[in-house]
Image (tube, helix red, strand yellow):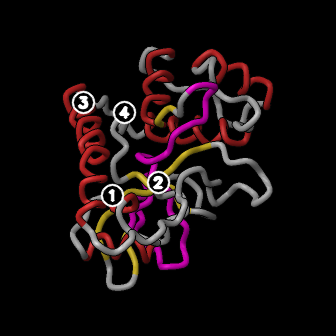
Amino acid sequence: MKLKDYLAIAGEHGLFKFIAQGRNAIIVEHLETGKRTSAHGSAKVSSLEDISIFTDTEDLPLSKVFDKIFEKENGGAAPDSKSGNDILKDYFATVLPEYDRERVYPSDIRKVIMWYNILHTLKLLVKEDPEESKEKEGEGDQEEKTAPVKAKAKAAPAKPKANIGHMALPWTTATRTPWIRTKTSRVSVHHLLMCARLNINADCTNSMNI
């Protein structure tokens, strides 16, 4: 599924779409109400495009999880996200049997299903073109290949980068084990603005120190 520009903001219900860059904030639009608002530098913004779910093998992008739900439901809606924990866990196990049961909590599954149903209700679930998916993977491979070359070209030692790999989303507690891998789950709006001003895409979180 294409999840570009869809955002979750800590403390706010539902999903938002990135609209534009403001002076000291980003402008977002609530998908369900259409109301536009500003997310300032203190806001914790999560991009759905950069979220992955822990599994027993490798992390699976949220877009792929949505694909699996879509296929299971034949294009229909998922069960009510307000269902009981056991019902949610049993359902998610049929969608993604290999999901990590120790690190993915019922509350996390509830979020995934709620997001899916919001996008489904608004008819915003759009399948990603296989060619586009291949291009993204190719770009990632190319970055990995070229990164060492760039490092060798610099005389000065590279500055250590902040670890922004496995991190809990804003609504999880600090003591809980994170359930997702995300590039931007804890990236502040201030950082997103820096990327926009430098005309860098969402992957800038991999190339900038924050």
Q: Looking at the image, is mark 1 or mark 2 earlier in the sequence? A: 2
Q: Earlier in the sequence, mark 2 or mark 4?
A: 4
Image coordinates of residue 86 in percent, x first then y, are 80, 25
The residue pinned by badge 1 equals 202
> Which of the labelled discs sits on residue 134, or is there none?
3
- The residue segment tinted magenta is 28-57
Q: Which mark is residue 1?
A: 4
For the residues labelled 2 and 3, the Cα–Cα distance comes to 20 Å
Disc 2 versus disc 4: nearer the observer: 2
Residue at 27 percent of width and 69 percent of height: 154
Query: Badges 3 and 4: C-beta atoms under 8 Å apart?
Result: no
Q: CA distance from mark 2 to mark 4?
A: 18 Å
Q: Residue at x 54, y 52 (%)?
A: 165
Q: Which residue is mark 2?
A: 183
Report the front residue among 92 and 73: 92
Amino acid beneath label 3: Lys
Image spot of residue 48 (x, y percent): 45, 47
- Please, what is the three-letter code of the amino acid marked with disc 1? Ala
